[in-house]
Image (spheres, rainbow, N blue to C red):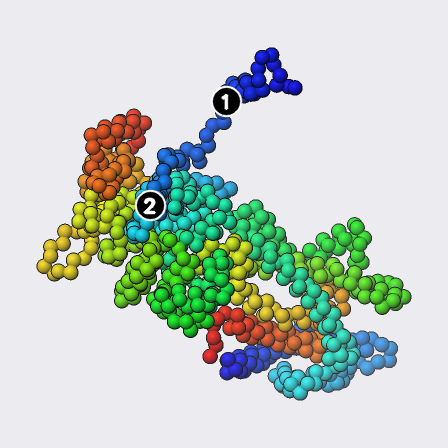
Amino acid sequence: MRKYILKRIFLSVIIFFFVMLIIYTLMRCLPTSYIESVARQKSMQPNSKSYEEWMEQLTAMYNMDKGILAGFFGWLGDFFRGNFGDSWFYTVPVIEEFHDTVWLSFVMGLIAFFFELIIAIPLGIIAATKQYSRTDYTISIIALAGISLPTFFFASLLKLLFSVKLGWFDLFGLVGRNYEQLTAWGKFLDKSHHLVLPIVTLVVISIGSLMRYTRTNMLEVLNADYIRTARAKGLSERKVIYHHAFRNTLIPLVTIIGGSLPGLFSGALITETLYSIPGIGYASYHAMVSGDIPFSMFYLAFLAILTLLGNLIADILYAVVDPRVRIA
Amino acid sequence: MPYMKAGKTDDEVFEENKQASQQHAEDFPKPKKTKREKLVEDDHAPLIYDPQYILMVNRLKKYFPIKGGMISKTVGHVKAVDGVSFNLKRGTTMGLVGESGCGKTTLGRVILRLSGEKTAGQVLFNGQEVYDLSPKEMRAMRTKMQIIFQDPFSSLSPRLPVGEIIGEAVREHGIVSSAEFDDYIDGVMDNCGLQPFHKDRYPHEFSGGQRQRICIARALALNPEFVVCDEPVSALDVSIQAQIINLLRELQEKYKLTYLFISHDLSVVEHISDSVGVMYLGNLVEYGSTENIFSRPLHPYTEALFSAIPVPDPDAKMNRIILKGSIPSPANPPKGCKFHTRCEKCMEICKYAAPEWTEVEQGHFCACHLYNDAAADQRAAQAMEAAKREGVAPEKEEEAL
């Protein structure tokens, strides 16, 4: 087992290297250059140096005068030494901005994840046990709608209904206008109130796939011979479904759920941006459109590590929950 | 008092009202019978329970609907079991043979009520109609009637250790007290040739033969009277087959079990059975003692089937009857006798009239027009005339490939 994990980690490092090489190249080739826009602004000021002179000075200042490969290895070395640099756009150290935003995203993701599980898994089981019934079709159609709706469209619908028509929630933002006057408890309630719509959005767009996954796996198990054995034993239907069938459905479920755990930290770029929630997704969106290379690189490296970690966790969990899989 | 009329009691007035309402009901046309009801005729005469038989099956039918079209309506039925009758004596073994897809396995499952509801007919287990039981009573009844499945690899839950597979239902039904539980499971496992230390292992750690022993132990742990063995050895190699067959026989003697032994291996059936039923396309075509059936097969299908048994003598002249074509679709079986499309001795009458289930010799039943007595011949001729008048076309000869 240890040998297997070590091998996987080694492989992950190699994958990480190439992923970051590609991302760095892309970042450097982006047409939005932060340096250019700063140089343009400075050169427009009265009695200023020319644009070319500013460019030269700023490029050297921001360490962008090297080639892509040299720049990449410089970045990689700094990254592994724990020196993530300063964000150009936020003008604070990258790690500080990251620390300020990631926990909000994590809390949001965790709550959404929790609701996703308690809604999607029971629905999937119900749909599978009543296959081809009206209940099954209704659940499947809702799930399909959830998968198919683009986030921005669904979020706009929610805003139209609950913010514009009903006026229950603010259109965007994490805090209300009188936030500063509230007590600590009031501040907490205010934030929670503002998080309702973003979390609803996250839950609705994500339950579909998990529900369908549960249903498919449950159906496969329910048609297995050992379920007939369990019925022949004279066990109650409840026991057949929850003790025998669901236990076997858990193997693939735990695997993908475990694999998606690191994803809780990655934030929700579209949802956070639509609702202007200052989470990590929102922060990285602004960094990216303004061409903030240090922050974007850090965020994308973080995502790459989370994804690799998720896959590793999924594989290890697979061995833990399934007695047939024993990785040597 | 509403029912008070001059000189009449309440009951008389009540009776009068009832008759009047019946007359009114006749004025209105009754709703037409739906197609579904027509397709499935429940033509069994109720059986009288005979205590020497543990299992009595009477004109049992199981049709599976074929869904089709946009709104998945039923467009037809697969007649997997189409009117099967037999009685099984306590403590004996009945072999059930037939081609693949003839409904053997379905029959076994329908008898145990493992395949949804029956379509028509009766299944009396110890005189009790199995399909009349409530879910709770049915669960209790399951301890008395068990099944060993064909595939020992897929019929054991991969997530449960062997001890739990065997013991779960024992605990669930409270067959032994919790103090005796461990010893009881050890005893059952020992009977089936398993070691006590196997209890904590998972099914995937065993070989096919051992897994089938687990299946047998699981069935027997519930202390059943009747076990359906659904091709229990066909997934095993020959050396293991003999072990499992002998184990089944030992256990039968020890616990006075009754077996319904489903198999397509005729030599295995001959070895283990007291009586044999031959199935073709959802029907039992012949039923009798093993001795009678193997020495004097009556039905042409049985003859053809038994002529395929290899004889261990190189000089023996094999007289194999090769059946033409393949088994017809059970969704649209041939009219008349279902076997007539492939029968060597097919007569005109076979194409129109279904043969009756008759007792040709003492305890030897067969459904074939060859063995009709005069009265049956007459009935068949009438049926043929009726079919011809209705314009039932005889089945086309199957084209040779």
In whole angstroms, how far apart are the C-alphas of marks 2 and 1? 45 Å
Secondary structure beneath label 2? strand
List x then y, in percent, for residue A311: 56, 73
The chain to which mark 2 is attached is B
Circles 2 and 1 on the same chain: yes
Q: Nearer the viewer, residue A127 or B375?
A: B375
| Residue that mark 1 sits on | B29
Q: Which mark is residue B366?
A: none
Q: Quarter of the image holding residue B6?
A: top right
The residue that appears at 43% across and 48% down in the rendered structure is: B113
Secondary structure beneath label 1? loop
Q: Nearer the viewer, residue A160 or B145?
A: B145
Tell me which amino acid carries mark 2.
Tyr
Give the farthest residue toward the left: B315
Disc 2 + disc 1, Cβ < 8 Å: no
A328 sits left or right of B359 in the view: right
- Where B215 falls versus B361 (above or below)? below
Q: Nearer the viewer, residue A270 or B131?
A: B131
The chain to which mark 1 is attached is B
The residue that appears at 72% across and 68% down in the rendered structure is: A107
Task: Tell which circle, 2 or 1, labels the residue nearer the N-terminal end.
Answer: 1
Give the farthest residue toward the right: A181
Tell me which amino acid carries mark 1.
Pro
The answer to whether residue B21 of the structure is visible from this angle is no
The residue that appears at 26% across and 29% down in the rendered structure is: B379
Give the farthest residue toward the top: B6
List x then y, in percent, for residue B59: 35, 39
| Residue that mark 2 sits on | B53
List x then y, in percent, for residue A109: 69, 66
A303 sits left or right of B197 in the view: right
B47 sits left or right of A112 in the view: left
- Where A19 falls versus B22 (above or below)? below
